[in-house]
Amino acid sequence: MSRSRPATGVVLALLLLAGQVCAESAVETLRRALKKGATEPRVAALQEAARAGGRLSAEERRQTTLLLRKVLGADGDPLVRQEVVRTLAALHDEAAWVPVLVAATSDRDEAVRRVAVDAVLTAKGDVLPVAKKLLKEDQDPTFRAEVCLLLGRRQRLDAAPILLEALADAHPRVQSAAGEALEAVSGEAHGWDGKAWARWWEKAKPGAAPAAVPRPGETVTGTPQAPEVPPPPPPQKGLVPELYGVPLRAKDYVFVIDVSGSIGADGIATAKSELVKAVERLGSDVRIAALFFDEEVRTWHPEMTPATPAAKDELAKFVRGIGRGSRTDIMTPLNAGLAMVRRRVAERVAAKDPAPEPVTMLVVSDGQENVKGTPGEVVGDKLDRLDLSQSVVHAICVGGRGSVLMEALARRAGGSYVVVP
């Protein structure tokens, strides 16, 4: 006796219902797997979710993104958090790219940051609308600048229109990052010159690319090769800011700034403003240090630091907190700055990357000491005690009176001597 088969419509309805239940349970399945204590099953669940990412509906991607954003913010296991970043990138969803970009610029764990950076650098065009929106809407200029630099490190023309818009950002930190990124994308050196970049883009922008059609007999494989992270872009060349008219073309700078009473309140405010303005325009591959002195020396960082957007933000805040001092001791900060120079040179030698030019130090002061005064007849003896062999020193004398000490310092160290009214 044969069994009767159910009607075709009933079978189809049951299959659709089963598929809906299965799809609806995918996020819950991942949620339960991520609650397990061991690292390995949680990583495996995330890898499976990444493989399935392309098959998820828009609503499923949204739910998965919300879940993974919470895990990325709260989970203490760095291996799990690294896999979360990879899974978010594999979703190819605008909302999923936001936490990846944030992780690439500021995650607390360096390994997670590296994974996020690699995800952005190998991303296709789906990351660009998210980056464009963040560059327009996010309130933090440091984050906007970091996003620009990431787009530049991809070294792909598709980001050029977004970076051209970022050149018009209200903050110089973002403008400089956009210029640096465009140099990485184009191989040209126009700094933050918007008009020059617009002319370049008119010539460089691609036309509509024809759809790729396989040639007769060509085999099309369904297994794409893993994307490769592009090599670091060449050093930027077009970002050349100035400090009191002295062009900053080198790759290592020690700034020594006088904040003593003899400079005057206006002189100190101008010196601080000039320093921040110049540093904001430096490329992120330049290393900097800053010392502020009166009768004591206040150091921003104990060692030279890359001029990243985060470092620029930190220095700007540090400078705002520097008050007006009283007396002046110029030889102590000069020795402290030259010690930083020697350590930086030693680092480059140890890394087998000797500097093509000496480390540069810029001293901004009126040169008027009143702690241990330097009469003109003993200036030479004072300077003989300084090791100027590994640095170029520019002496910027503020106040308009000039200084025998500052002039002799610049002359002996091969730098410029500038008198500022």
Image (cartoon, helix red, strand yellow):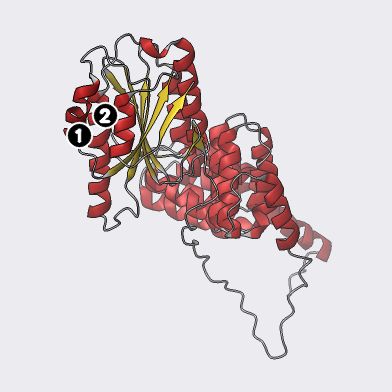
Secondary structure beneath dot 2 equals helix
Furthest-front residue in this view: 377
Inter-mark Cα distance, 1 to 2: 8 Å
Evaluate whether residue 28 shows in this view: no
| Disc nearest the viewer among 1 and 2 | 1
Q: Is residue 302 above or below residue 132?
A: above
Residue corresponding to mark 2: 334
The picture places residue 193, in percent across and down from the top left corner, at 65, 45
Q: Residues within 10 Å of mark 1 (few under 14, many from 20)?
A: few
Camera-side residue of 360 and 312: 360
Q: Is residue 157 left or right of residue 87?
A: right
In the rendered image, the quadrant that contains the N terminus is: bottom right
Tell me which numbered mark, 1 or 2, is placed earlier along the sequence. 2
**Residue positioned 45% across, 39% down in the render:** 107
User: Residue 386, labelled with which disc?
Assistant: 1
Q: Is residue 171 left or right of residue 113?
A: right
